[in-house]
Image: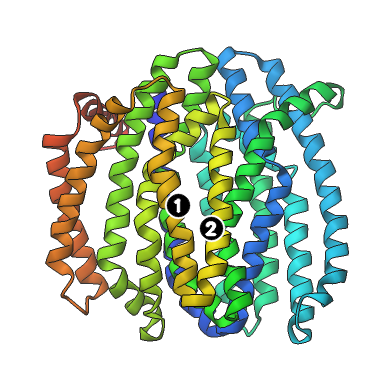
Amino acid sequence: MSTTFKLFKGSALQTITLFVNLLAVFLLFPFIVKTLGDKIYGLWVLASSLTGYYFLLDFGISQAVSRFIARALGKNRKEETKSVISNSIFMFSCIALFTIIFTIILAFFLKYFVPSDILLISRILLITVGLEFAFTLPLRTYGGVLKAHLDFDIFSLFDLITIILRSGLIFFFLSKGYGIIALAIINLLTSVIFYLANFFYVRKKYPEATFNAKLIKKKKIKELFKFSQYIFLTQIGDNLRYKIDSFVIAGFIGLASVTLYSIAVKIVDYYMQLMIALTSAVIPLFYRYEGAKDFDSIRQKFILGTRISTIFAFIIGANLIIFGKNFIQNWMGKDYINAYSILIILVIPYIFDLSQRMGMGVLQSLNKHYIYTIMNGVEGVINLILSIILVQKIGIIGVAIGTAIPLLIIKGFIQPYIICKHVDLKISKYLREISKIVIFLLAFFSLVYLLFYKITSMSYTFMGIAILAELSILSITLYAFILRHEEKKIIQDIFYKLKEKSPI
């Protein structure tokens, strides 16, 4: 199987998995909110955000594993693969043990921070989150092995099965009268099942991916930490950007407002996940090119990947702006329509942020990811400060604005310049390659917005037909006038590969 088709297959299955997840959220989210109520669901949002903070404790080693194994494959060094796996499992096991102890201590001191009426529930949620992290952390190494081998299709297949299982269990137990604790236990069990599936598959397909205590070396641990420390700091920035808003709102406004804000954030979150699914299969290629010292390919694929990312980011983001209000009204009801204002404020900067997805992969491949870390950290700190200031002046909208301003400036304008500098690419060439697409997409979706913005009530069917018609016109126009010969050839190659594999 060619690398191009393998990447396409992985991205396609990741996208399908995400759409199934979206469908599950679409069907379950209103049911869960109604069953738990705004206040308890707000508590669940905080617990979910806490999960993100727990995963800071992997110190970025998961991504380091994928990067170092991909480099070893690029250099055809199997012994290096074994060493990375053994040392990462050892490190993860130590961190998991620390996590259990930390969780027990934190659960004890929770009484000083949480109201007594939700103290017991909060402790159970905390312990469940801690156990989920501790049980799955050592197994995350095998997910890194799959990604390094570009087996995104297998990883996504296991994810797809887990989503279906989790959704079914949530619906069943909440229908039977169980509440937030059942949600936490279901998340724990299904996460363990997912990572065990990765483990057994890797052990069968890649026999060399085994743990060997003799390969545990202080030098290799330091090497992994040296790379992962910047990813760890990046993850801190990500948590300040993505997870802190809920705590700010809970502290200054209340748990019920967390639920309203989470509606917009959930839509934006799946927007990000969809973009990651569409683009992440390409990023390990940068690691391989770096391992082979093929810097020309890094520059070429960076431009190509950014052009494609820009198209997808604008398509999804623009449609959220055009149809988001009617979607929220149909999905959650008129009581939650104010979530649309938050959605608009967040989506606009995210369009520019997600257009730059390839940049992070390039910096990581060049071992320059500390630059992304600095940008992320600065953005996260500014986000927190602005959100705290603005929430006291204009409420929940202020939190959204506090997130949007640093995101737009740093990721939309500063990041492209920095990446071009480090891949020895003239910013003028980069702008020429990207600006034509951006100008076209802005003009196209402005016309679509003017066509639909006065319609105050749209059914799902109407929105679906409108989007299909819009995408048909857009696809034809892009292919005929905007895409380059190389990009058209990739589409043609994928089409022919699919045709060859078709049973018809």
Residue 277 vertical position relative to residue 45 in the rendered view, above or below? above
Quarter of the view holding residue 6: top left
Q: Who's the residue at 63% across and 69% down the image?
A: 46
SS under mark 1? helix
What kind of residue is marked 2? Answer: Asn
Visible residue check, residue 142: no
Measured in 3D between alpha carbons, the distance from the residue under mark 1 to the one under mark 2, in whole angstroms, is 8 Å
Q: Are marks 1 and 2 in contact (CB under 8 Å)?
A: yes
Where is residue 194? Give x, y as percent. Answer: 63, 50
Residue 429 vertical position relative to residue 322 in the rendered view, above or below? above
**In what quadrant of the picture does the C terminus appear?**
top left
Residue 311 vertical position relative to residue 271 in the rendered view, above or below? above
**In what quadrant of the picture does the N terminus appear?**
top left
Viewer-proximal residue among 284 and 325: 325
Q: Is residue 129 left or right of residue 436?
A: right
Disc 2 packing (10 Å; few <14; some 14–19; many ≥20): many
Q: Who's the residue at 44% across and 34% down the image?
A: 359
What kind of residue is marked 1? Answer: Leu
Q: Is residue 98 left or right of residue 328?
A: right
Q: Which residue is mark 2?
A: 383
Visible residue check, residue 375: yes
Viewer-proximal residue among 38 and 207: 38
Disc 1 packing (10 Å; few <14; some 14–19; many ≥20): many
SS under mark 2? helix
Numbered label attached to residue 407: 1
Q: Who's the residue at 40% across and 61% down the image?
A: 346
Q: Who's the residue at 66% across and 42% down the image?
A: 232
Viewer-proximal residue among 388 and 116: 388
